[in-house]
Amino acid sequence: MNVLILCTGNSCRSQMAEGILKSLHPGWNIESAGTRPEKKVNPMAIRVMKEIGIDISSQYPKNAEKFIGEPIDVVVTVCDNARESCPVFTGDVRRRHIGFEDPASARGTHEEILHTYRKIRDEIREAMTNF
């Protein structure tokens, strides 16, 4: 199974989903990418993933265009913007949208922001478990 998880910046939600899905399905080829990728993975995403035993610190943002022409079975968009600006993947590609709030836009104290990241991580983990 070849799965591509798309988000806008590919720095947080899609990276967490990639890490979780890889932990659940080690035999699958799972990648994440962004329509406008950031330069690095969000440090708070790395932190909250480590809390559940998944290390995404070696992952890095990639441009979605890199995967055009690659064999892909399923494209999963995890933000509305990526769903709307998703590149066209040819062939028998199934599309699935599972939108999540962007934890990077959370405001408040450090603990409140951390709580938001954990909440989104847990929502992503539930959705990927039911994938």
Image (tube, rainbow, N blue to C red):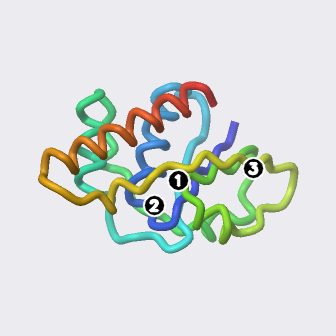
Side of 72 relative to 90 (left or right): left
The answer to which quarter of the image holds residue 79 is bottom right
Decide: few, some or many residues near mark 1? Use Cα within 10 Å; few <14, some 14-19, many ≥20: many
Residue bearing the label numbered 3: 95
N-term mark: 3 or 1: 1
Decide: few, some or many residues near mark 3? Use Cα within 10 Å; few <14, some 14-19, many ≥20: few
Location of the C terminus by quadrant is top right
Q: CA distance from mark 3 to mark 1?
A: 14 Å
Side of 67 relative to 40 (left or right): right
Location of the N terminus by quadrant is top right
Disc 3 versus disc 1: nearer the observer: 3
State the residue lying farthest toward the right.
92
Compared to residue 63, the image places residue 130 above or below, namely: above
In the rendering, at what x and y percent does residue 110 appear?
A: 13, 51
N-term mark: 2 or 1: 2
Q: Residue at x 83, y 61 (%)?
A: 90
Decide: few, some or many residues near mark 2? Use Cα within 10 Å; few <14, some 14-19, many ≥20: many
Instruction: Residue type at mark 1: give it.
Output: Ser
Q: For the residue labelled by badge 1, is the local secondary structure a helix, a strand or a loop?
A: strand
Residue 32: image tag? 1
